[in-house]
Image (cartoon, helix red, strand yellow):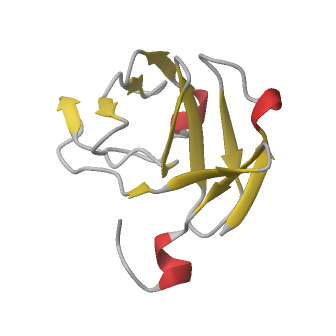
Amino acid sequence: MIPVCHLADLPAGESVRIDTAPPIAVFNADGELYAIDDTCTHQDASLSDGWLEGCLVECPLHAASFDLRTGAPTCLPARRAVRTHPVTIENGMIYVHHAAEEGTAA
């Protein structure tokens, strides 16, 4: 598990980037926490810099959109999904279960 930040430090509608390999973005979408690979699959852009609307994040570079629940693209130009990662909260701290760290894809 990778510690991200305290839950109180990630308000609804915000995101945080973790510098892992590859980088991971953690989003607070109206109180639900989601973690995905931070790099858009269309072109190298940070999704944590994108626009969050409900469970969708829009890439700031070419407006590709991804569903945070599944990682699936919801419109072009992205065609490939981003990898998702399980998130847990323990004692007020957000943790991401990094798939590469655990040897499995989420």
- State left or right for residue 106 relative to residue 49: left
Towards the viewer: 42 or 32? 32
Towards the viewer: 30 or 41? 30
Residue 106's place in the image compared with 33, above or below, is below
Q: x, y percentage for residue 36?
A: 46, 49
Towards the viewer: 91 or 100? 91
Q: Residue at x 63, y 17 (%)?
A: 12
Q: In which quadrant is the C terminus drawn?
A: bottom left
Q: Residue at x 21, y 51 (%)?
A: 80
Quadrant of residue 77 in the image?
Answer: top left
Q: How many numbered discs? A: 0
Q: x, y percentage for residue 5?
A: 80, 45
Q: Residue at x 59, y 16 (%)?
A: 13
Q: Residue at x 23, y 42 (%)?
A: 72
Q: x, y percentage for residue 49?
A: 60, 29
Towards the viewer: 8 or 62? 8
Residue 51's place in the image compared with 57, above or below, is above
Farthest residue, direction front: 91
Q: x, y percentage for residue 88?
A: 59, 52
Q: In which quadrant is the N terminus drawn?
A: bottom right
Quadrant of residue 96 in the image?
Answer: bottom right
Residue 63's place in the image compared with 15, above or below, is above
